[in-house]
Amino acid sequence: MTKPCLACYLYAVFVLLTVSTSLSAPSPASSLYDTFLQCLTQNTNSITQLSSILFAPTSPTFPTLLENYIRNARFNTSSTRKPLLIVTPLTESHVQGAVICAKSVDIQLKIRSGGHDFEGISYISDEPFIILDMFNLRAITVDLEAEVATVQVGATLGEIYYKIWKTSKPVTSKVVKGNKTIRASVVALFLGRANEVVSILEKEFPLLGLRAENCTEMSWIESVLWWDDDKNLGAKPEILLNRDLNSAGFLKRKSDYVQKPIPRAGLEGLWKIMIELGKAGVVFNPYGGKMNEVPSDATPFPHRKGNLFKMQYFVNWDDPSPAAAQNFINQTRTLYSYMTPFVSQNPRSAFLNYRDLDIGVNTFGKNSFQEGEVYGRKYFNDNFERLVKVKTAVDPENFFRNEQSIPVYPSKA
Ligand SMILES: Cc1cc2nc3c(=O)[nH]c(=O)nc-3n(C[C@H](O)[C@H](O)[C@H](O)COP(=O)(O)OP(=O)(O)OC[C@H]3O[C@@H](n4cnc5c(N)ncnc54)[C@H](O)[C@@H]3O)c2cc1C
C-alpha cells in the first residue's frame, strides 16, 4: 500500500493554483515536465504515448512509483530529497531518449534497476535529479543449448531463478550444519548428491564432522526457495515472482576482506563486542576454491586469490527514529573499527554490492579524482586505473555519476 504523502498533496495543490492563476507562467516543475516530454517525443522511436512513461511529483502515481523500489527505509522519509521526474521506459529507445533529454536539461540522472543499493544511491541525491526507473524492462530468455541466459536489468533474481527452473530441472543437495558458541551456524549449498559432499568434506575439512544425516537433498529450485527463507520449504516456486513492493526495513551494511587467519583472541574479542552491542552481526563468506582460479584482473571485481573470506557487518531495525538509526549504524562502525588489525590493508578492501558511503564519497569538485581513488581502490584494487581510463574515454563529462562512481582523470587544462 502507498503511504499518503502530505507534502506531495500540498505541492499538487500549489501547482494547480499556480497554473490556474497564471496560465502564461507555468510552475518550474510543470515546465520541466513539458520540456522533457517534448524532448522525449523528438528523441525516441516509439508508438507509446510518452506521457504514460513520464511522471512529475504532481502525478498521483508518483509517490507509489518512487516508493515501490525503495529497499532501505532509511531513504524513505519526508526529508529525503525527491526526484524532479521519474521516467519508466518500456523499450530501449525510451532509455536512450531519457539519457539524451536528461543531458539536454542538464539534470543529474539516477538509474534504478532493482533499488537494492544498500545506501539508496539509485534513487536519492544531494542535487536535483531525475530517476530512470528500469523495473518494466524485465524480459528473460534462457537458451539451454547455448547455455546462455539474457536478462533485462529490471528483472529480479527470483524471476531469473524461476525462468531457469521452468526451462531445466537440475538437482542440488542442501547441507545444513549447526554449532554453538555465541550462536554460529554453518549453512551451505552443494550442487550434487549428499554422499559426494560428505566424502569431499571428510578429506578437506574433517574437523566439521559432516555426516549424511546433516544433509537434506532437494531439487535446485527448492534450495533457492529455502535459501531465500527457511519458512519457504514446501512453497510453490511462483512465490519467487513476488516483488514485495514498498516493503523495506531499515538497514546498514559494511564489508571487509580477511587474508590471514584471525587469532583466537581476536575472534573472542569480536564475540564480546557483539554481545555488548546487542544487535549488529557479522557474516563470513568463504573464498578460495574456484574464486582463486579467476585472475584478479579478469573482471572489475578484484577480490580473488589471497582472500580467505569476506565479512559483512549487518544490522536491520524497525524503529524509524533518527536516534535508532544513529545507534545501529554506530554498532556496525564499532565492529568495523575493532576488526582493523585483522583485515586487508592498503587498501582496506570492500565489496561493491555492500555499498558503504562511510568509506568515501565524491563531491565532484576539483578533487573528484582523488576522492574517487579513496573508495575506488577499496572496491576495485588495481583494476581502478583501467576503470578510470574507460570512464574517461566513454563519459569524459562525467554525466553518469553517483556518490561512489568511477571518476574521470583530472583535465590537463
Ligand atoms: C535486502 C537486500 C539484500 C541483499 N542481499 C545481497 C546478497 O545476498 N548478496 C549480494 O551480493 N548483494 C546483496 N544485496 C546488495 C545488492 O545485490 C546490490 O546492491 C545490487 O547492486 C543491487 O542491484 P539493483 O539493481 O537492485 O540496484 P540499484 O539500487 O537499482 O542500483 C545499484 C547501483 O547501480 C546503478 N544502476 C542500476 N541499474 C543501472 C543500469 N541499468 N545502468 C547503469 N547503472 C545502473 C544505480 O544507479 C546504483 O548506483 C542486497 C541488498 C538488499 C537491499
Image (cartoon, grey):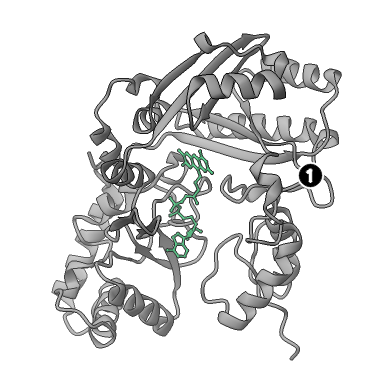
**What residue did someone put label 1 on?**
306
Residue 322 shows in the view:
yes
Q: Nearer the viewer, residue 43 or 104?
A: 43
Q: Residue at x 71, y 46 (%)?
A: 292
Is residue 396 in sight in this rendering? no
Q: Position of residue 213 (x, y in %)?
A: 50, 9
Quarter in which the C terminus is drawn: bottom right
Please state which of residues 298 and 63 is positioned toward the viewer in this rendering: 298
**Residue at image coords 82%, 27%:** 262
Pinpoint residue 379: horizontal percent, then vertical percent: 68, 54
**Residue 388, quarter of the rendered image:** bottom right
In the picture shown, does residue 103 fall above or below 261?
below
Question: Is the residue 302 above or below the residue 51 in the image?
Answer: above
Q: Quadrant of the N terminus?
A: top left
Q: Residue at x 55, y 34 (%)?
A: 325
Q: Is residue 397 left or right of residue 150?
A: right
Residue 208, picture quadrant: top right
Image label count: 1
Where disc 1 sits, the SS reads: loop
Seen from the viewer's position, the closer of residues 49 and 294 is 294
**Front one among 242 and 336:** 242
The x and y percentages for residue 233 are: 33, 20
The type of residue carrying mark 1 is: Gly
Q: Is residue 8 above or below residue 197?
A: below
41 with respect to 107 (left or right) = left
Question: Most extreme residue toward the bottom, as rendered?
Answer: 413
On the image, the x and y values in percent for residue 348 come to: 78, 47
Give neighbour class at mark 1: few <14, some 14-19, many 20+ (Cα, 10 Å).
some
